[in-house]
Amino acid sequence: MSPLALAFVGDAVLELLVRQRLVETTRLPPGKLHSTATHYVSAHAQHLELALVEPLLTEEEQAVLRRGKNASKASVAKHATPQEYRASTGFECLLGWLHLKGRDDRVQELFEVLWNGYDPHQ
């Protein structure tokens, strides 16, 4: 499967995890939920979140991450540097790959690390 297809799935996986956690832990109205979620799922945020989980990755996970980072893209997000965009695509690729392999336990483990370690106000 292409790294960009895996990133497509991984983007949805991360978005769902963040939304679920926000609904479980806050009492924000829908508009605030969305704006808060964007602080966790933007390319900039994913770049910083990846730095938290990257030291925990297995060799196989690192290889999938590299494939995602190196995937060719036609465009770059307007609010992210090329480095942030490549890192976020790699991270999404990894999450998509883990999810499709049925490794949602590992996805949850990595998500807990980023949720507990990431400051969305950085």
Image (cartoon, rainbow, N blue to C red):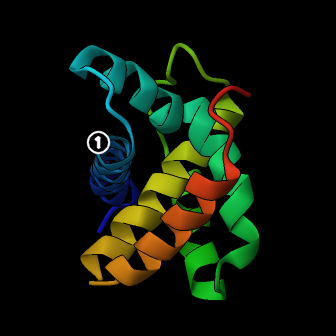
Residue 27 horizontal/vertical position (percent): 32, 31
Categorize mark 1 by other alpha carbons within 10 Å: few (<14), some (14-19), many (20+).
Answer: few
Question: Element at badge 1?
Answer: helix
**Residue lying at 74% horizontally and 28% vertically, measured from the top left:** 122
Residue 68 horizontal/vertical position (percent): 51, 57
Is residue 36 visible to the viewer in this orientation of the structure? Answer: yes
- Left or right of residue 48: residue 77: left
**Residue lying at 39% horizontally and 46% vertically, measured from the top left:** 25
- Amino acid at the residue labelled 1: Val
- Vertical position of residue 97 compared to residue 103: above or below: above
**Residue lying at 35% horizontally and 64% vertically, measured from the top left:** 96
Is residue 70 visible to the viewer in this orientation of the structure? Answer: no
- Would you identify the image quadrant in which residue 45 lies? top right
- Would you identify the image quadrant in which residue 97 lies? bottom left
89 or 37: nearer the viewer? 37
Residue 50 horizontal/vertical position (percent): 65, 54
